[in-house]
Image: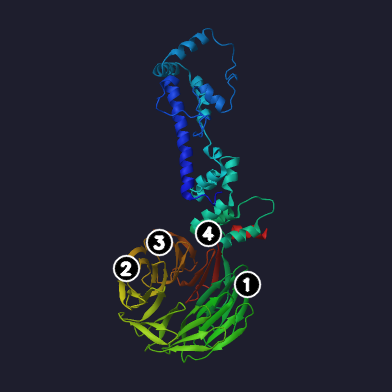
Amino acid sequence: MLQTLSREAALITCRVFVSLTVFSNLQMKRKLDHGPDDVDANLPRLSLSSPSCLVQAPPTTFGDLRLANGHSAQRRRVTSGPPPSGLQDWLHIFQTWSGPERLLALDELIDRCETSQVKHMMQVIEPQFQRDFISLLPKELALYVLTFLAPRDLLQAAQTCRYWRILAEDNLLWREKCREEGVSESASSRRRKCARPGVAVSPWKSAYIRQHRIENNWRKGDTREPLVLKGHDDHVITCLQFSGDLIVSGSDDNTLKVWSAITGKCLRTLTGHSGGVWCSQMSVATVISGSTDRTLRVWDAESGECVHTLYGHTSTVRCMHLHGNRVVSGSRDTTLRVWDVSTGRCEHVLTGHVAAVRCVQYDGRRVVSGGYDYMVKVWDPETEACLHTLQGHTNRVYSLQFDGAFVVSGSLDTSIRVWDAETGGCVHTLTGHQSLTSGMELRDNILVSGNADSTVRVWDVRTGQCLHTLQGPNKHQSAVTCLQFCRGLVLSSSDDGTVKLWDLKTGAWLRDVVALQSRGSGGVVWRIRASDTRLVCAAGSRNGTEETKLLVLDFDLDDRKKETD
């Protein structure tokens, strides 16, 4: 019934019920105050004999109210002895008084009572006016009322009584709450598989609680030490990828290593490049790497096999972007190449830059590239035509973001430019950074930029407004090396040896997620990659003060521990 009942109809039904309850209490109050003869004659009298009425006529005295609530009028509330003489005469006189006279008499009586006697009156009276309106409603309407509660309030409501707990475990109710909070069905399915038999717990409620715990672990931290994955000797980790439970690191030692995010073990080393690995991309278990040896290689991370070696570039492969079954690579030879990952065939060559291509983005329809020639270019890869050359930067372009509508470019000239991808026009020039913008993330018209000036800035690309500058007493002390969005948070790494966590909406610093022992004296966090539940950091140093290593932080350890048990 709940699914078929329209929102408007349910709301009207709730309002009718509440109105009748209020009306009933109003009549009761009037009759208690003024007596049955003083009730407004214009108020309709509700009774079961009237076909248009939905509730029974309210009781006229407090004794009637006790009977209506299931309490016997014959039960003596005080049994300290026989009633005082003259009690019945006093009660008879009291009944002859009008409502205002009764109130005056009660006021005088209360003033003459001892504290214990007033307490006794409260214990008798208060329970009669306490109504569990949720239990009085039909189940469908009770569940509808609970949909207006926030998830945390719903968890508290479940502690009220047994019936409320039964209602608050409703799986459809929690499915709606999870939808509102953005909790996916996959999380619910995962928990459903892990649920113990015989325990009646809503899978969707379990999914919400798990997500809430993970969010709390991100924001407030965990006392557990991260996994430390040591490899690549003292070389620099130049690129980092993370998919599922697999981590792939690339280094200037000419290799890539595949690690288990669960155990921290190095599963295999991918060898074949004859020069340093400078860039990589990953999808599930397929890894593509680019090297100073002028080749790209396609690997199966699960077997360690090199599936294809892609020849064509005549200089270092400096950047790449994977979309679907295609990868676009940019090289110091000034060209871009579009490759079919499954066959290893070069499908298109894009020429037009007059200096090294430093960054590239590909959305399956358009290719956007930035180079050392100060230019940003928009390409149609199928025709190999350059649709727009975006001119405006006065120094090398080092970073790009592209969401299909906007192209955002970061340059050594300290500016960030926002371009219209269809027209090629410059929409905004974002100023404020003092040095090279080395990395950016664009999502839902919100841009986060990391700069060598040690700051991170949050922008609205539609207005060009800087929403936040992530700095202050806890800001980075050196150049920002990498950043990433995650769960409404911003993660930023730096040459100062830390990874900091910021609130995207407020710009507030939350905590240092990672702080190397050698921070401030040579320790560097080069790269970071994050999923909803894990953070992977590539760290080391350029002066030997910190070993080259990967740090893996798991924010879902409570859940994982239960599964292991």
Q: Is residue 308 left or right of residue 13?
A: right
Measured Cα–Cα span from mark 2 to mark 3: 26 Å
Type of residue at label 3?
Answer: Asn
Q: Quadrant of the C terminus?
A: bottom right
Say if mark 2 contacts mark 4, CB within 8 Å.
no
Mark 3 neighbour class, 10 Å CA radius: few under 14, some 14 to 19, many 20 or more: few
Mark 2 neighbour class, 10 Å CA radius: few under 14, some 14 to 19, many 20 or more: some
Q: Is residue 180 left or right of residue 261?
A: left
The residue at which mark 2 appears reads as 464
N-terminal of the two: label 4 or label 1?
4
Q: In the image, residue 292 lies at what x, y percent?
A: 49, 87
The residue at which mark 4 appears reads as 183
Q: Secondary structure at mark 4?
A: loop
Residue 265 circle label: 1
Measured Cα–Cα span from mark 1 to mark 2: 45 Å
Measured Cα–Cα span from mark 4 to mark 1: 31 Å
Say which residue appears at 55% left-offset and 27% top-offset: 68
Does residue 380 appear anywhere in the picture? yes
Measured Cα–Cα span from mark 2 to mark 4: 31 Å
Q: Secondary structure at mark 3?
A: loop
Say which residue appears at 48% left-offset and 10% top-offset: 90
The residue at which mark 3 appears reads as 474
- Mark 3 vs mark 4, foreground winner is 4
Measured Cα–Cα span from mark 3 to mark 4: 31 Å
Q: Is residue 314 left or right of residue 160?
A: left
Q: In the image, residue 190 lies at what x, y percent?
A: 61, 61
N-terminal of the two: label 1 or label 2?
1
Type of residue at label 4?
Answer: Val
Q: Secondary structure at mark 2?
A: loop
Does 103 appear above or below 135? above
Q: Nearer the viewer, residue 383 or 210?
A: 383
